[in-house]
Amino acid sequence: MFKSINLLRLDKGQEVMRELASYCKRKGISSAIILGIIGSLEKARLGTPATDGKWHAQQNDYSGHMSILSGQGSLSTYKGEKIFHVHMALIDPTRPGEMIGGHLEEGIVWATTEIYIGELTYQLQRTFDEKLNAPVLPTT
């Protein structure tokens, strides 16, 4: 199933999505499962779907010393363009019991962050879903 398993480690101040895209481009990876993301962020922009059921993200910005509890997603293509779809759950240790999460649009690393990437042996290809007004992965 996996062609390779890759580890990308990021340091303070690096932007997660930009570095992930750069790494995959450098390694020639166009189809992958983001198996896990652990570490910490000092800033995050998370998107959540609009309440009308269509995909157009409402974005919210967060800052603080946030621990990444969970992060996963996929890398696929749509009309020849790479599409990252990454979700993340975060907690700020200074605010016990308050967890935030959503579609990761942007994240600035606080101390360090590790991203585990499972490169697939086949190409994940998105198709357009009229009802959602968004490119989606087909059911297999």
Image: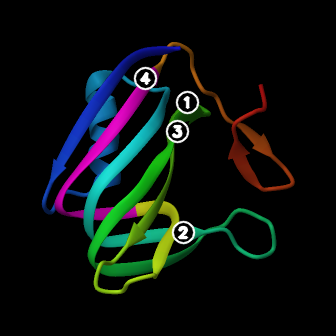
Specify the quadrant of the image occupied by residue 30: top left
> Secondary structure under badge 1?
loop
- Give the Cα distance between marks 2 and 4: 25 Å
Of badges 2 and 1, nearer the viewer stands 2
Seen from the viewer's position, the closer of residues 44 and 94 is 94
- What residue sits right under mark 2 in the picture? 47
Would you call the spot at circle 2 few (<14 residues within 10 Å), some (14-19), or many (20 or more)?
Answer: some
Q: Which mark is residue 80?
A: 1
Seen from the viewer's position, the closer of residues 90 and 97 is 97
Q: Which mark is residue 119?
A: 4
- Give the Cα distance between marks 3 and 4: 10 Å
Asked whether 135 falls inside the magenta stretch, the response is no
- Give the Cα distance between marks 2 and 1: 24 Å
Q: Amino acid at mark 3?
A: Ser
The residue drawn where x is 60% and y is 26% is 124
- Give the Cα distance between marks 1 and 4: 18 Å
Sequence order check: which comes first, mark 2 or mark 4?
A: 2
The single residue placed furthest to the front in the displayed view is 96
User: Could you tell me residue 52's position as x and y percent?
Assistant: 81, 74
User: Could you tell me residue 17's position as x and y percent?
Assistant: 35, 52
